[in-house]
């Protein structure tokens, strides 16, 4: 017998197998049992799987004239050949003397012109990987890499179809060590898939995102490499606002959200920075907010925690002690450089408040009230975070709900105007300025006027008496805002310190 790598199908045998497949597709009432018996005989012949593969690989139309008399579509014959081949391989009917030849016939079909053929071949390839593992098919890894690198969309789609099926069936294979390879397969593929996030073809952006999202929910440790995580989160944030509605649906979004929340709690600053960008992008995108709504309580707590300085952030404490000599531009530069995570968290919280409105207050306000009243030098960071959160959501989408907490908030902020730390005094002034609309609208009532008078006196005290120039500036700004709001609303106040 000829060597396997020189094996060629015999024409009459190929015609016989095709004829059997035609009868399998369109059986008559009398020969169903005969067809079944014949198939049982064939599957125990070692060349049968090879013939099925050859038929699957045949072009359209099939170059076998006698088939015309059955009037069966050639594509149907190829599809049935692939189905039987997959079943034979799945049930362990492997003849290793022909297996290498079968593999060599399958690889070119990964980029077949017909999508159905590509899908069938992807299933067969995944079945072979289940049976033998990637370690016995290094040529497959090379082919997939070349297809992902190709500028032809059909090549990219073929590779991602195979990878998706492997991920569905045996994801651990992609994370296995392969002798002769410098890295695990998934580390070969992830950079290529991230690149496809930027493809001009929406279908490729969707497929690449769908694969990565699905894979990381099954094998999350594989994105522990910071470079991979950065690329993933940057791409995810951009695709959340993609021009294509199909891409914006973010395949496996619920699993991704759960994964991202886990990252937020467990990962370092760089990963957390990118995670904040993802939450902001989700809020700004056109996806349905119901998907994110169930995760709001946990997400709000995560974002609030990011507004608290790290326990070992000595640079912030130094800034607190020395910021008397900083002008406001210098301080703003320091905030951007040192508190980037905090600023991104604030932005994400602001976006969420516009999307979900008063809903976020159910989780946020208990955190704010608890931490505003948290006294002592050691708790200054959580007090600051609570004030920042208030200032972030004021005048945003949850104004109606925030008004219900107004009297308690104002009392807490006025108290914080006497805080030991200049930064807390300063941002408390700023938060009060953002609440001026609420403060002014109640001045017609006795309690409202009393609250207004307390705010006026407290701000004036900071303007005149505070030793820190930045606090004085913040108090002046808040006082000016208060006067402006009064004028806009045409409210007359009879107060010895405010003559209108």
Image (cartoon, rainbow, N blue to C red):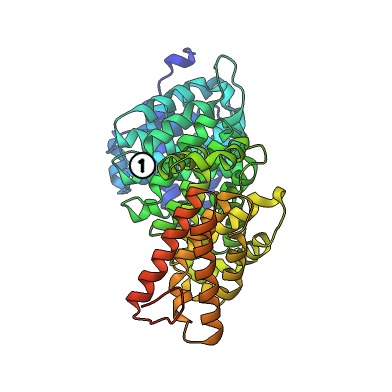
Looking at the image, residue 358 sits to the left or right of residue 411; the answer is left
Furthest toward the front, the residue is 496
Q: Which of 82 and 355 is in front in this view?
A: 355
Eyeballing the image, is 209 above or below 228? below
- Residue at 43 percent across and 67 percent down: it is 395
Residue 246: quarter of image:
bottom left
Q: How many dots with numbers?
A: 1
Q: Nearer the viewer, residue 367 or 382?
A: 382
In the rendering, at what x and y percent does residue 147 appear? 38, 29
Furthest toward the bottom, the residue is 445
Looking at the image, residue 378 sits to the left or right of residue 116; the answer is right
Residue that carries the numbered disc 1 in the rendered image: 204
The answer to whether one can see residue 82 in this image is no
**Crowdedness near tag 1: few (<14), some (14–19) or many (≥20) residues, C-alpha within 10 Å:** many
In the rendering, at what x and y percent does residue 473 appear? 44, 53
Residue 221: quarter of image:
top right
- Residue at 58 percent across and 56 percent down: it is 299
Looking at the image, residue 95 sits to the left or right of residue 346; the answer is right
In the rendering, at what x and y percent does residue 103 appear? 48, 25
Q: Nearer the viewer, residue 475 or 274?
A: 475
Eyeballing the image, is 137 above or below 270? above
- Residue at 58 percent across and 45 percent down: it is 217
The answer to whether one can see residue 406 in this image is yes
SS class of the residue under badge 1? helix
In the rendering, at what x and y percent does residue 149 appear? 36, 27
- Residue at 36 percent across and 35 percent down: it is 156
Quadrant in which the C terminus appears: bottom left
């Amino acid at each position: 017998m000829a060597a396997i790598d020189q094996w060629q199908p015999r024409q009459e045998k190929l015609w016989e197998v095709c004829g059997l497949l035609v009868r399998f597709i369109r059986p008559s009432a009398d020969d169903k049992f005969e067809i079944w018996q014949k198939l049982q005989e064939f599957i125990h012949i070692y060349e049968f799987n090879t013939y099925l593969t050859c038929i699957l690989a045949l072009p359209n139309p099939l170059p076998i004239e006698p088939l015309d008399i059955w009037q069966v579509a050639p594509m149907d014959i190829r599809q049935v050949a692939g189905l039987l081949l997959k079943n034979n391989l799945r049930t362990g009917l492997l003849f290793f003397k022909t297996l290498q030849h079968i593999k060599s016939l399958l690889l070119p079909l990964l980029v077949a012109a017909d999508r159905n053929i590509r899908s069938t071949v992807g299933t067969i390839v995944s079945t072979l990987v289940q049976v033998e593992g990637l370690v016995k098919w290094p040529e497959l890894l090379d082919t997939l890499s070349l297809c992902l690198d190709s500028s032809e969309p059909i090549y990219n789609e073929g590779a991602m179809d195979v990878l998706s099926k492997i991920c569905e069936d045996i994801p651990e294979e992609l994370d296995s060590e392969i002798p002769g390879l410098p890295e695990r397969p998934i580390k070969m593929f992830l950079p290529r898939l991230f690149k496809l996030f930027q493809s001009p073809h929406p279908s490729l952006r969707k497929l690449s995102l769908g694969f990565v999202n699905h894979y990381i929910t099954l094998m999350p440790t594989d994105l522990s490499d910071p470079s991979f995580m950065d690329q993933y989160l940057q791409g995810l944030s951009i695709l959340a606002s993609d021009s294509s509605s199909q891409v914006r649906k973010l395949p496996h979004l619920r699993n991704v959200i759960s994964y991202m929340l886990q990252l937020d709690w467990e990962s370092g600053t760089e990963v957390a920075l990118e995670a904040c960008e993802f939450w902001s992008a989700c809020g700004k995108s056109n996806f349905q907010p119901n998907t994110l709504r169930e995760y709001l309580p946990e997400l709000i707590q995560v974002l609030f925690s990011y507004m608290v300085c790290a326990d070992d952030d000595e640079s912030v404490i130094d800034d607190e002690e020395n910021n008397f000599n900083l002008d406001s531009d210098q301080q703003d530069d320091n905030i951007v450089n040192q508190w980037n995570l905090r600023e991104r968290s604030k932005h994400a919280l602001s976006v969420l408040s516009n999307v979900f409105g008063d809903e976020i207050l159910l989780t946020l306000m208990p955190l704010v009230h608890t931490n505003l009243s948290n006294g002592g030098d050691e708790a200054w960071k959580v007090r600051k975070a609570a004030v920042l959160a208030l200032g972030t959501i004021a005048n945003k989408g949850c104004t109606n709900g925030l008004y219900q907490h107004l009297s308690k908030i104002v009392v807490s902020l006025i108290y914080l105007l006497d805080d030991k730390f200049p930064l807390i005094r300063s941002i408390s002034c700023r938060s009060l300025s953002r609440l001026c609309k609420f403060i002014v609208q109640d001045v017609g009532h006795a309690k409202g006027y009393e609250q207004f008078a307390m705010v006026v006196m407290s701000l004036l005290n900071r303007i005149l008496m505070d030793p820190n120039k930045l606090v004085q500036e913040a108090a002046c700004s808040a006082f000016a805002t208060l006067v402006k709001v009064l004028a806009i609303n045409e409210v007359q106040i009879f107060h010895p310190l405010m003559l209108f």
